[in-house]
Amino acid sequence: ETGVTQSPTHLIKTRGQQVTLRCSSQSGHNTVSWYQQALGQGPQFIFQYYREEENGRGNFPPRFSGLQFPNYSSELNVNALELDDSALYLCASSFTGGSEAFFGQGTRLTVV
Amino acid sequence: AQSVTQPDIHITVSEGASLELRCNYSYGATPYLFWYVQSPGQGLQLLLKYFSGDTLVQGIKGFEAEFKRSQSSFNLRKPSVHWSDAAEYFCAVGLMDSSYKLIFGSGTRLLVRP
């Protein structure tokens, strides 16, 4: 059974640029959630994807968007990067309605 | 609004000593409750979870947690800490509205003295 994998592990971008982060969900899981973890804080829910559609969003602006593919993998896209977007981005997969989420190792994004 | 509070930012214990990390939540119903551990630069690993039933739950690595409804608490305990337990610990509540999501506390960093 493969776990949740994220790529890349680290990324440096310039303010105003766009970035795409990727996540492969754990085998058999059909729901993917994305979280942002700023330095020294707990993770915050960005959004969730199920059946290739967004089905819940936290308090994040529209420049944060995502995709889910038929194989349940997912992408997080952030446009017009701001310095405050620097964070660890975590992907979590689960079964539909499942209450236990399994996390990847995260992508560390630095915006300069 | 639902929230999770971890009142201790840092805790330092000696190796072999007991440990208790505090977690309080604000939620209308009986929540799903979780403890996760995060080593530096890593993702989150689930230590244990509470859904219903027995209020004392056992997890991995010798950790346990007790759900106390009257105190809205879900404290994490370990009888004897090992140096490898040094990490950041997060308490979380599972919340269902338009989708199922986790609400995390701000974390407690555990330091272990040799």
Image (tube, rainbow, N blue to C red):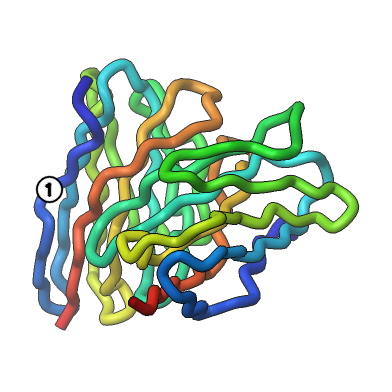
**Residue B86 location, quadrant:** bottom left
The local crowd at label 1, few if under 14, some if 14 to 19, many if 20 or more residues have their Cα within 10 Å, is: some
Amino acid type shown at disc 1: Ser
**Residue A38 location, quadrant:** bottom left
- Identify which residue is drawn at 21% across, 40% down: A23
Q: In this view, does A48 lie to the left or right of B73?
A: left
For this orientation, the residue located farthest to the right is B70
Q: Which of A94 and A59 is in front in this view?
A: A94
Q: In which quadrant is the N terminus of chain A drawn?
A: top left
Q: Nearer the viewer, residue B102 or A55?
A: B102
Q: Where is residue A24 in the image (x, y as percent from the top left)?
A: 20, 33
**B62 over B112 or under it: above or below:** above
Q: In this view, does A70 lie to the left or right of B66?
A: left
Q: In which quadrant is the C terminus of chain A drawn?
A: bottom left
For this orientation, the residue located farthest to the front is B16
**Residue A66 location, quadrant:** top left
- Identify which residue is drawn at 11% across, 72% down: A13
**A3 over A107 or under it: above or below:** above
Judging by the rendered image, the residue that carries numbered circle 1 is: A7
Q: Is residue A39 left or right of residue A110?
A: right
Q: In this view, does B40 lie to the left or right of B104?
A: left
- Identify which residue is drawn at 26% across, 81% down: A83
Q: Position of residue A79 (x, y in %)?
A: 24, 62
- Identify which residue is drawn at 23% across, 64% down: B41
Q: Mark 1 lies on which chain?
A: A
